[in-house]
């Protein structure tokens, strides 16, 4: 990972803000963090942080290789799959997988969210003296790209072991934080109306499986019956074997 000063590119922020303002948002660098502010809504700023808060708690107390996400992607003693996270979002699940030792390639089509992710990764890389965070984010790579376009051009020798999808859906968690994040994502990128197509393409571009995160009790994505499932209290991972 390239060395970062920890300060975002001002010209890039200005260019992104030119399009954000009409949607009611603004990127602001303050208190050593890159924040996405809502201008018209009474939201606290959206910040991605891989060092403190929930990321730290998941890193220290997340359950290791026994947690459902680890089982869903096929983590076993001595084996860590190479994972493509095609719906990176805030990078939380990618960070968990990297914490468990996986090499994770993240793809995010929103330039704004990708900018927040890139800043958070660089900040975490500079915190390499804090509980191995630098080594963890060293296993994470970010590409700003439409996942479908990327997959179509992916060569057979570059296929990942696992593709991970976490498409947007009506979330049962009614907390203010979750509602804020869902509203922001829908304002920035709309609904994931192409998620079913992405699943179909993904099954042709993976070596071992595609994992789709869904709320427990929700319909399967695109009415495609999974080959097997891994469930937790509130979440279900639908797992599909490759079609190639």
Image: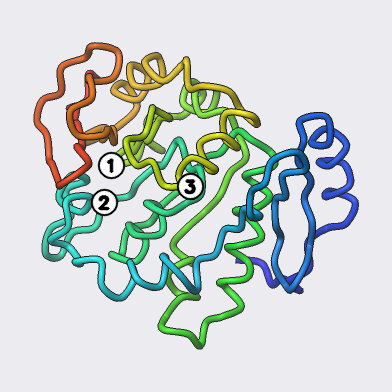
**Where does the image place residue 100, in percent across and percent down from the top left?**
28, 64
Mark 1 or mark 3, which is nearer the start of the sequence? Answer: 1
**Where does the image place residue 120, in percent across and percent down from the top left?**
60, 62
Relative to 192, residue 25 above or below: below
Give the quarter of the figure containing the N terminus: bottom right
Residue located beneath label 1 in the image: 161
Mark whose residue sits in front, 3 or 1 = 3
Which label belongs to residue 81? 2
Q: Nearer the viewer, residue 175 or 67?
A: 175
Relative placement, left or right, of 118 versus 153 is right
Residue located beneath label 3 in the image: 176
Q: Nearer the viewer, residue 94 or 242?
A: 94
Circles 2 and 1, Cβ within 8 Å, touching? The answer is yes
**Mark 2 to mark 3: distance in Å?**
34 Å
Q: Nearer the viewer, residue 4 or 52?
A: 52
Relative placement, left or right, of 189 versus 52 is right
Relative placement, left or right, of 50 versus 93 is right
Mark 1 or mark 2, which is nearer the start of the sequence? Answer: 2
In the rendered image, which quarter is residue 65 located in? bottom left
Circles 3 and 1, Cβ within 8 Å, touching? The answer is no
């Amino acid at each position: 990972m390239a060395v970062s000063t920890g300060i975002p590119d001002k010209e890039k922020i200005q260019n992104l803000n030119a399009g954000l303002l009409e949607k009611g948002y603004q990127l602001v660098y303050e208190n050593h963090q890159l924040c996405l502010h809502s201008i018209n809504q009474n939201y606290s700023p959206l910040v991605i942080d891989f060092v403190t808060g929930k990321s730290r708690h998941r890193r220290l107390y997340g359950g290791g290789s026994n947690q459902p996400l680890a089982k869903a992607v096929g983590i076993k003693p001595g084996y860590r799959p190479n994972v493509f996270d095609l719906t990176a979002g805030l990078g939380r699940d990618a960070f968990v997988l990297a914490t468990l030792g996986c090499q994770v390639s993240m793809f995010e089509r929103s330039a704004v969210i990708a900018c927040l992710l890139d800043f958070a990764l660089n900040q975490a890389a500079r915190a390499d003296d804090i509980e191995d965070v630098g080594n963890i984010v060293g296993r994470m790579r970010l590409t700003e790209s439409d996942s479908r376009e990327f997959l179509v051009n992916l060569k057979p020798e570059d296929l990942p072991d696992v593709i991970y999808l976490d498409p947007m859906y009506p979330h049962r968690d009614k907390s203010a934080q979750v509602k804020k994040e869902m509203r922001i994502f829908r304002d920035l990128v709309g609904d994931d109306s192409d998620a079913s197509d992405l699943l179909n393409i993904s099954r042709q571009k993976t070596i071992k499986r595609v994992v789709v995160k869904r709320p427990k009790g929700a319909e399967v994505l695109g009415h495609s019956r999974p080959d097997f499932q891994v469930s937790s209290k509130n979440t279900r991972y639908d797992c599909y074997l490759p079609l190639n």
